[in-house]
Amino acid sequence: MTPTMEYLAVQRAPHTPTPVSAWGLLRLRQQLEKGLPLTARPYQTLAQRCGLSEADVIHAVRQWQAQGLIKRLGLVVRHRSLGYTANAMVVWDLPDEQVQAVGQALARASCVTLCYQRPRRMPSWPYNLFCMIHGVDRERVLGQLSALIGQHGLQPYPHCVLFSTKAYRQQGGRYVSED
C-alpha cells in the first residue's frame, strides 16, 4: 500500500467518539445558539472555541438531531441589508380542506420565501394561511401577488397584504444561559 492510499484509509475510518465533558457540551450548545461561524470548516471552528475535536462536534450535533434536540439548522438572511425593503405577509382566509394544497403550491413559487398555516382567531382574525413575499419595491411585490392569485385561482378568497414597517432583530432560539 502506498503512503497516499494508507492516508486515505485512515481519513475514512469511522470516528469513535471520545467522552466529552458536560462542560464541553454546554459550551458547544452555547456556541451553536449563536450560529455557525462563517468559515470554511465551521465545525472545526466551533471545536476550537469549545476545546473539542471537530469529529466530536459533528458527532454531538448528529446525536442531538437524532434525539430531536436540534430540529433544523437554518440561515437567517438580513434581507433589508440586501435591498429587499418591501416585505409583505399575505394572509388568506381559505376553506380548511384547501389550505394544505394551496400552501404547498404557494411555497413552490419563487417569490414566496415562507408559507405556513396558523389557526384562525375568530371573530377578528379569519386568516389561516400566511405567506411572505420579499421584494425591492411594493409595486413589484403586488405584481407578484397578482400573478400568484391568477396562477392559482385564488380570486374568490379573502386576503390581506401586510407590509412590514419595521425590522426586528432575527436570531435563533436561546436555551443555554451565558452564565
Image (cartoon, grey):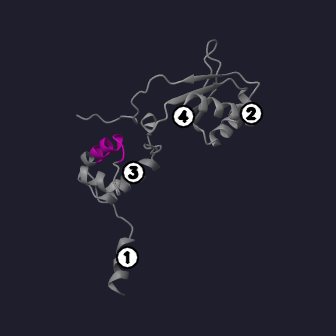
Q: Residues within 10 Å of mark 2 (few under 14, many from 20)?
A: few
Q: What secondary structure characterizes most of the magenta part?
A: helix
The residue labelled by disc 4 is: 134
Q: Residues within 10 Å of mark 3 (few under 14, many from 20)?
A: some
Foreground residue among 47 and 35: 35
Identify the residue at image location x=37%, y=76%: 8
Foreground residue among 124 and 6: 124
Sequence-first tag of 1 and 2: 1
| Residue segment shown in magenta | 25-36
Foreground residue among 43 and 81: 81
The residue labelled by disc 1 is: 8
The residue labelled by disc 2 is: 150
In the rendered image, is residue 149 in sight? yes
Query: What kind of residue is marked 1?
Result: Leu
Query: What kind of residue is marked 2?
Result: Gly
Q: Residues within 10 Å of mark 4 (few under 14, many from 20)?
A: many
